[in-house]
Amino acid sequence: QVQVVESGGGLVQPGGSLRLSCAASGITFNIATMGWFRQAPGKQRELVATITYRGDTGYVGFVKGRFTISRSNAKKTVYLQMNSLEPEDTAVYYCNRYYAGRPEHDYAYWGQGTQVTVSS
């Protein structure tokens, strides 16, 4: 069973940057596809980006070119570099082991997440 601890969120002005980190345990990290998700107030949790054990990445359209997902298998950590942040990016960000085709509401476990607030 995966366990994660997300960190790195905070308050940033529009156009600013943040780097989120996610330390994972309880799984064989170096073969797991990992994902970053987010949940804005009043909205469903949604996928943001994924990264396979080999480092192949995928992004949802609204973050392409602005966000970069990466990982360190040695540190069992996934990162999300977020640039050109917009107020619409305000949300609690979560990471998790990613299962293709599984709806977000079908994941049995979520960490506490890290709050990202984009505001002037």
Image (spheres, helix red, strand yellow):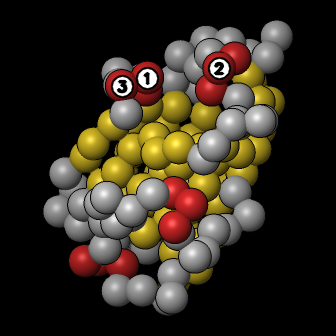
Residue 103 horizontal side relative to residue 15, left or right = left
Residue 62 falls in image quadrant = top left
Residue 93 horizontal side relative to residue 28, left or right = right
User: Residue 88, which numbered label?
Assistant: 2
Q: Is residue 79 above or below residue 91?
A: below
Compare residues 58 and 29 and report the one nearer the observer.
Answer: 58
x, y (%) of residue 19?
57, 41
Residue on which the image places disc 1: 62
Q: Earlier in the sequence, mark 1 or mark 2?
A: 1
Q: CA distance from mark 1 to mark 2?
A: 10 Å
Residue 26 horizontal side relative to residue 117, left or right = left
Residue on which the image places disc 3: 61
Compare residues 102 and 82 and report the one nearer the observer.
Answer: 102
Q: CA distance from mark 3 to mark 2?
A: 14 Å
Q: Are the residues at dot 3 and dot 1 in contact (C-beta closer than 8 Å)?
A: yes
Q: Are the residues at dot 1 and dot 2 in contact (C-beta closer than 8 Å)?
A: yes
Q: Earlier in the sequence, mark 3 or mark 2?
A: 3
Q: Residue placed at 73% from the left, 22% from the top?
A: 118
Q: CA distance from mark 3 to mark 1?
A: 4 Å
